[in-house]
Amino acid sequence: MASYEDLGFGKFKIYVELGYDERGKRNRRTKTITATSQRDLNKKIRDFEIKCFNEKDEPIDKITFSSFVEKWIKNHVEPNLTLTSKETYAYLLNECGVLDHFGNMKLKDIKKFHIVEYLANEQANHKPSIPNKYLLLKSIFARALEWDVIHLNPTAGIKEPKREKKKVDYYNEEELNHLFKVLDDCYPKHRIMIKLAAIGGLRRGEILGIREESLDFENNTIYIDKQLRYDKKKKKFYLAPVKNKKPRTVYFPKEFMEELKKYHVEFKARRMQVGNLWRSIHDDNDNMINLLLVREDGYPTHLNTMRNEWDKIIKRYELKHISFHQLRHSCASLMVKKGVNFKVIQERLGHANIGITLDLYSHLEEDQHKESTNVFEHLF
């Protein structure tokens, strides 16, 4: 029900009564508007009343999945999670059909069977990101239980769907040697970026997050503590902690660090030449961030640009096609073949735990397992 108060000079305050909430508190919305006639006033009252009823909070026992998700995003995702996690959740909800499937169902009516059936159908239809959809639903219903919106968590006891084991493709030692030879003819920045991935095992964001202060030419190391990210909504670059929030120091061959030092000297000369037109990004305190692998004018290099340039190099030199990320696998694979301790490989790659490293690369030791039987031959 709507009413209004005449404030004079063509201004009116509209009141819309929405009843009482579960605590017995009166629920009333107000809005001050300007109207030129009674007809205009009636229209604005009607429009505001419809808007209020469309946005009216649902009682907890009638709240739908989509309504709860809005509150889950507002009260949990937005204040607590990284931008990457927010974008992933938004993709799963809106692009991958989770909201389309569960959106209109009342939250309390969603049972374990509904989730098991949904995941099974997704699996049968070869839909993507099934394990991630499961983790998304698990997070949503865990908060619903914690906030007393539901009394039982329908995801409890449901096993996480198995992740499809992706084939780890990479360059072997001979292919890496060939790659490094053709890189001599490439643009210096692209050559450095590719070697940082193939020798250091760095991720794209970590490579682009390297600053001048990250370099230690005396000890031939680079400190990896940040990654470059891009906020699509704000359309701006920013530095975020590395994956797993575990900074690490990565050692490089002396020859590569000398090459990097030469690039750094030329980089500083170029920045001085550009002067005030240098387009560096700044931190929250408005301090310039001294990113190393940037465009000619100092503006950050986009992650997609790095991938595109790598694809061009593959095509130009007719290299075996692997993704830029698989240069990181090439680094790890070579270390496995050379007998480097898995703990050292884990720390170099920045994996959260050694289990991830073993799961990805232990199959490469198959030849070594076969050779290990040779030690028993003298017994027969």
Image: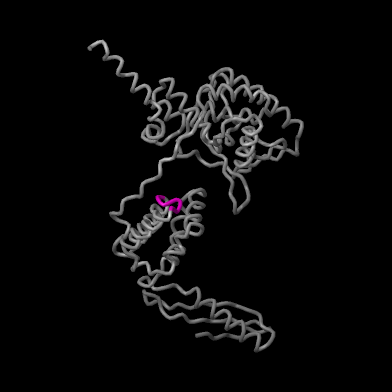
Location of residue 304 in the rendering, given as x and y in whole percent from the top left corner: 61, 42
Residue at image point 55% right, 24% down: 176
Residue at image point 38% right, 30% down: 363
Residue at image point 66% right, 32% down: 316
Would you say 65 lies left or right of 375 here? right
Is residue 54 positioned above or below 279 on the image? below
Residue at image point 46% right, 39% down: 245
Q: Quadrant of residue 14?
A: bottom right
Is residue 252 positioned above or below 282 on the image? above
Is residue 77 positioned above or below 268 on the image? below
Query: Along the line of sight, which residue is nearer the eye, 153 or 245?
Result: 153
Inspect the magenta stretch and tell me whether residue 350 lies in it. Answer: no
Q: Which residues are magenta?
A: 126-131
Q: Residue furthest left?
A: 380
Location of residue 132 in the rendering, given as x and y in whole percent from the top left corner: 42, 51
Q: Residue furthest front?
A: 380
Q: Residue furthest top?
A: 378
Location of residue 231 in the rendering, given as x and y in whole percent from the top left corner: 58, 49
